Each structure stands twice: as structure tokens, then as C-alpha cells.
Amino acid sequence: MQAARRASTPLRALHGALLQRLRVQPTGAAWGVLRAMSGEAHAQGTYLDRSQVVDRVLSVLKSNAKVDPAKVSETASFQQDLGLDSLDEVEVVMAIEEEFALEIPDAEADKIKSTRDVIEYVASHPRAK
Amino acid sequence: MSTAAIAARRALQQQRSRVLYRKTLRNVLSWAVHRDIFYVEAQKIREQFEINKDVANLETIDRLLYEGETRVEKFQHPDPYIGNCASLKCRFSRFLDMGLPVFSSRQFS
């Protein structure tokens, strides 16, 4: 019994060395599902591309019925340029939350006053989808 | 009252109305789970807010805000949706999928 154990340790050392050198990424649908369920990517935080964020934010603003699509731009202020009410601003923030699957707390939502604020917030949020 | 105090009070009331509107919309989102129903209800809520849009008297505004806040407390959902699950396929396991804390029975065994 002990002889067998002593013989297995060099094999085990080889096994360990092999594992340290080989890092095989799990591929295939099954492994992908398991990794998604483990929440690994979720914990690291996946930031979105800024250009993608800009496109999506502008499309959300343009699809709002109270907004004139011609005036929507990256630096448009909600109250001055787009002529939105304070309640309209709340609705815009809710639409952004819906688009990017976020939950924006009240303190942050009160600070969002222009398109640039929205883009900055979403681009720097680790959980934006 | 000085104009600065009046302006400060107005600003506070505007912030309270914004917070109240957000709170009612979030509450409606917990009650009206499907988005198309939510949009209809949100439009109704907006119309109720619009009725009192042009009130100028500060005391009336305070009273209206107080009434709104008590109403939203009364209609608060007992088991609200925490976090935005618009992108999830299934809301049943949303706490797991969104990384929120989950209490499993294994902890208490």
C-alpha cells in the first residue's frame, strides 16, 4: 500500500506540472452554460463599447414620443435643447434603465441632465448589457 | 418669506415630485409585470401628475405631495422586483442570474 503511494507521487508531480502549464479554455455549449450560471463574467463586470452605448442611447431618445429626433445629439441637454419636463427626464431615465437592464439609484438619476451624462453613466457601469 | 427661501422650497418640492414619480413608476413596474400593460398604467399615472401641474401655492403643493407619498406607500407591492430583469429570460431565478444574495435552505439545515 505504501509502496504504491510512494510510486504515485512522481506521477502526481508530473500531473501537477502539466496542469500548471496547460490552460485549456472550456469550449462548447455545455461549458458555456455552466460558466454563465456560475456568474463569473458577472462578477468581473463587462463594460460596453462607448460607440455602441452612444448609438443605443440616441436611438432610445429618438424613439421617445416627446422628443424631436432632429435635436437629439450627444451633447443635448434635456431641459434646454430637447425641451423636456422634469417628469419627462424621469421617464427618459426609466427608458435607459429598460434598454440597458440597469437599476439606477435616485441620487444618480437626479444628476442625469443631458445626453452626455447618460452616456458617461452607462459606459462606466459594469453591469450594463 | 424671502425669495431665496421660496426658491429653495420650490426646488425641494420639484425634487420630491421627481422622486415620487420614480417611486410610483417602479411600484407600477412590480405590479404590471408585462411591459405593454406597464406603459398603459404609466401613461395614466402621468396624466394624474399632469392634472396638478400648474398649482402655484406652496402649501397646496406640499399637501399634494404628501397625499401622493401616502398613496404610493399604500399601493406598495409586498414582493417587489429588485433589480432590472428586463433582459432575463426567466424571472423565477432572477436573484441567481443577477448575482443578488440568495438564501438557500442549505444554510439553515
Image (cartoon, coloured by chain):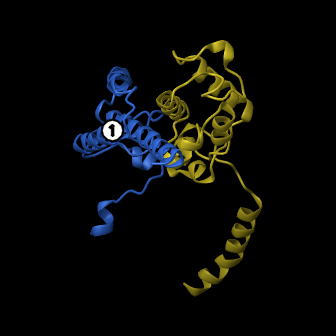
Q: Colour of chain B?
A: blue
Q: Note whether residue A105 is visible.
A: no
Question: Which residue sits at x=58%, y=45%?
Answer: A127
User: With A76 as the anchor, is B6 left or right in this view?
Assistant: left
Read off the residue under disc 1. Answer: B27
Q: Residue furthest left?
A: B74
Quarter of the view holding residue A20: bottom right
In this rendering, would B69 be left or right of A71? left
Tell me which residue sits at (68%, 17%) in the image. A71
Quarter of the figure that contains the C terminus of chain B: bottom left
A109 left or right of A119?
left
Farthest residue, direction bottom? A2
| Viewer-proximal residue among A103 and A128 | A103
Query: What residue type is disc 1 on?
Result: Asn
Instruction: Name the element at disc 1.
Output: helix
**B6 relative position to B103: left or right:** right
Label total for image: 1
Chain A display color:
yellow
Residue at the front extreme? B1
Residue A22's x, y, as percent? Answer: 75, 57
The front one of B104 and A103 is: A103
Mark 1 Cα within 10 Å, few/some/many (few <14, many 20+)? some
Residue at image location 70% in from the left, 51% down from the top: A24
Residue A119 visible somewhere in the drawing: yes
**Quadrant hosting residue B102:** bottom left
Looking at the picture, how far across and down is residue A2, in whole percent? 58, 87
In this rendering, the answer to whether B14 lies above or below A82 is below
Q: Position of residue B73 (x, y in %)?
A: 26, 45
Position of residue B43 measured from the top left corner of the image (x, y, whole percent): 36, 21
Which chain does the numbered disc 1 sit on? B
